[in-house]
Image: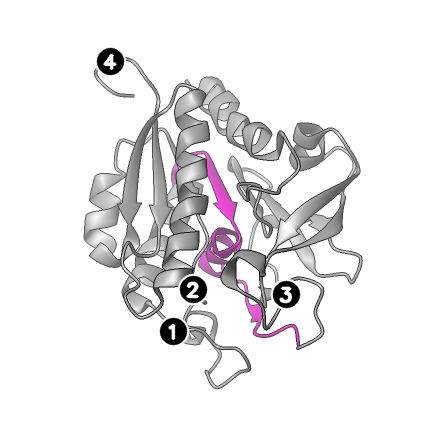
Amino acid sequence: MTASGARSLAVVEATRFRGHDPEYHAYVQLLVGRVISEARAQGWSVTRLAADEGTDALLARTESSDAIVVVGGEDIAPRFYGATGGYAHESRHLEVADEAQLALARRAVERRTPLLGICRGLQIVNVALGGTLVQDLGDRTPHVNRGVPIAEVLTTHPVLLEPGSRVSDLLGSGVVDVRSAHHQAVDQLGDGLVVTGRAPDGHVEAVEHTVAPVLAVQWHPEDVAAPAGQLTALLSSLRSRVAVAA
């Protein structure tokens, strides 16, 4: 909590600089900005952090955060989940950022700090808890549009939510349409996690921790074309969890 009494939220991205791909970076900034705007509208005091500053810096700067959002970005380096590179559509890797976000997710679970993971954020949570990833979903996957401008890479598809799960209760439905742009997915599930949402092709789209207040979705509720209310609902879950912890 800040000196003013507002709850503090850390919004954590992999990096603030992508000079090699300004178009992609600009779109990421748009998505992150929408998370921050909605969080502030809900009364959070938001701090925006880049994980590529390193593990010690990220853990220190989130030491007093009441809640955390880990947003989308590049592929996690395969060595963190016991795999190797060279797979199709492999992005560049930001291993300093990976290491820092993985440490942050582990600490959030240990301390029961509310955490919402979005896209890469879901994969960070899974890998942090010992899970692995499907490295590429193939050229014909419905989870991302290929060969189009960056603003058109997101696709819409349904997700089937587990009845009684936190995400189902938040979104008020057993089936929701989502905006998605991922070429990787959960393979082996991390310790303490349960799958609470799947795409029609069976790939994992939402996970929750059985004990810690950690929820993560593989899709982008912050996209401009996402169904109204998704981002609001998911962020509000952090506030309710903080209130319970207090």
Return the residue at label 2.
74
Residues marked 2 and 1 touching at CB (< 8 Å): yes
**In the rendered image, which quarter contains the N terminus?**
top left
Q: Which mark is residue 4?
A: 4
Instruction: Indicate which disc, 4 or 3, sits on the residue closer to the N terminus.
Output: 4
Q: Secondary structure at mark 1?
A: loop
Q: Secondary structure at mark 2?
A: loop
**Please, what is the three-letter code of the amino acid marked with disc 4?**
Ser
Distance between the alpha carbons at the discs numbered 2 and 1: 7 Å
Distance between the alpha carbons at the discs numbered 1 and 4: 40 Å
**Please, what is the three-letter code of the amino acid marked with disc 3?**
Asn
Distance between the alpha carbons at the discs numbered 3 and 2: 16 Å
Instruction: Indicate which disc, 3 or 1, sits on the residue closer to the N terminus.
Output: 1
* Residue 116: image location, x then y, percent: 49, 40
Return the residue at label 3.
145
Q: Which mark is residue 206?
A: none
Return the residue at label 1.
92
Residues marked 2 and 4 touching at CB (< 8 Å): no
Magenta stretch bounds: 110-138
Classify 10 Å Cα crowding around label 2: few (below 14), some (14-19), many (20 and above).
Answer: some
Instruction: Indicate which disc, 3 or 2, sits on the residue closer to the N terminus.
Output: 2
Instruction: Indicate which disc, 2 or 4, sits on the residue closer to the N terminus.
Output: 4
At a point 51% along the width and 48% down the height, the residue shown is 118
- Between disc 2 and disc 4, the foreground one is 2
**Please, what is the three-letter code of the amino acid marked with disc 2?**
Glu
**In the rendered image, which quarter contains the C terminus?**
top left
